[in-house]
Amino acid sequence: MGLVCIRFNFSWTKLGFGLNPVPTFAPRKVNPSELMSSIIRIRKGADIRLKGRAHAHVSTAPVSGKYAVQPGDFHGVVPKLIVRQGDTVKAGDPLFHDKYHPQVQYLSPVSGEVTDVVRGAKRRILAIEVTPDGKDERRTFDIPDLGKASREDVLALLAAGGWFGFIKQRPFDVPANPDVTPRSVHISGFNSGPLAPESGLVMEGRIEAFQHGIDALAKVAGAGGVHLGVKSGDATFDGIVGVNKSTFEGPHPAGNVGVQIHHTWPINRGEVVWTMHYEDVAALGDFLKTGTYAPERVIAAAGSACPNPNHFRIRLGAQVQSLLGGASFDASNVRIVSGDALTGKQVDADGYVTAFARQLTLLPEGNKPKFLLADGWLGLGFDKFSLSRAYPTWLLPKTKEFEMDTCSNGEERAFVVTGQYEQVFPFDIYPVQLLKSIMVNDIDGMEKLGIYEVAPEDFALCEYACTSKIDVQQIVREGLDTLKQELG
């Protein structure tokens, strides 16, 4: 009966008809213990081979002139200010808290003076800027013995220590709700995005701290425990205990935690899982070890337009220009992206590294005219990358890297069903039908098509491959927000 259903739905997809009948999403029931010793191969996807990879060395970035915590980085959080302009704070002092969860606080990464509270339309808080005083004074937290502490004690510590902002929950891809017990906690031990830093480099000297973070998460995880997805052939996390490990190989988005959850233990309706980036787990471990909050992060400054591709160790919320080494470039012809080229956010040189960014990507803006027969659509394209084999470069070795700009080569047009999404979308979900159900606000259709499992980043490759130039990630974000509002 299931096979007949799949064939029936496939015919509707191929013909590109509307939303009815809606394919039914039925998550597979997987026992995670069965997957611990096997390699899970992700076959759908694509590696975007950009030029400008950062050198395999980590330098300490200069102290930034200002640091900022931007509430907009934490989607869905309604900030309530605790400080005012002119206040003096230590690293770890609260700047604001979540209106609906007052115990969840967001802390200053440095000591200094609150020099500005930047507001936008309707007095929305965009950023709280702190100018460091050079003293690096830190607030001290009382850290309980994790072996004896209760789950409630650890939850309260994570909330007061500013860590719930970095723990996301699915469904909805928003900061985790401390009042809800998750089924399990999932961590991806590698990033497969373009020009992403290698986990071995990021975690050098921090494995012990990572283990401390795992021990704390195990206290707050539900009956499903903590799950860690590692890259095939990567020995970085071999010594970690207290987790259920799964090994993955394949193209991007194999490193996305959503892909790993889908292929190990899919989310059913009514279930909640928490996710956390592996570097944030290590930062949590440092916090538990020292009792102070001073979150450091390794950022890969990369891209073909980057004057000094390198890895930098920064304090969270640093200014972008502190990673550029004072290099001068024509800002009108270079786009600075906080994050990777597929999911990052465009920022200015005097802006700030966003809270969840692991890299700073500098790309040519793509605003220069292209000659029709050379660089235009009639050119042979020996230097162009394509997912559809439109250019002969697909015959070149997979080590070939390309200089790509931000030009979309066209504007948004009719939503054409071409089968491109399915080639790069490694979920047992119908991506086109899900997007259409979101666009027509079909709540029942969204649920049946598996929206509980996905986040905008899971559709980044679909957006890159889209012939119609549809802003796919924004559509998914709106769908998740709509569903969250409907469910209360």
Image (cartoon, rainbow, N blue to C red):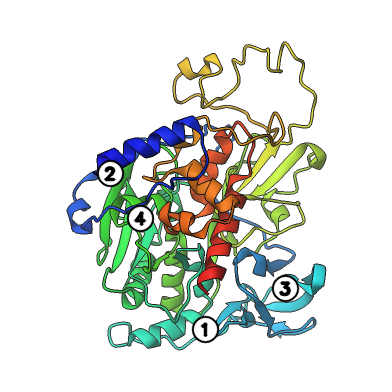
Question: How far apart are the two marked residues, 3 and 1, measured between alpha carbons?
Answer: 20 Å
**Image-based side of 486 in relation to 453, left or right:** right
Q: Residue at x 54, y 27 (%)?
A: 401
Tag on residue 261? 4
Q: Which is more N-terminal, label 4 or label 2?
A: 2
**Residue 353 in the image, given as x and y percentages of width and height:** 65, 58
Q: Which is more N-terminal, label 1 or label 4?
A: 1
**Image-based side of 105 in relation to 328, left or right:** left
Question: How far apart are the two marked residues, 3 and 4, measured between alpha carbons?
Answer: 37 Å
Amino acid type for the residue under numbered disc 3: Val
Disc 3 to disc 4: CB gap under 8 Å = no
Amino acid type for the residue under numbered disc 2: Ile
- Circle 3 or circle 4, nearest the eye: 4
Amino acid type for the residue under numbered disc 1: Ala
- Location of mark 3 (residue): 130
- Location of mark 2 (residue): 40
- Circle 3 or circle 1, nearest the eye: 1
Q: Which is more N-terminal, label 4 or label 3?
A: 3
Residue at the farthest front position:
20
Element carrying mark 3 = strand
Visible residue check, residue 313: no
**Image-based side of 363 in relation to 216, left or right:** right
Question: How far apart are the two marked residues, 1 and 2, measured between alpha carbons?
Answer: 37 Å
Q: Report crowding for label 3: few under 14, some 14 to 19, many 20 or more residues within 10 A (C-alpha).
A: many
Element carrying mark 4 = helix
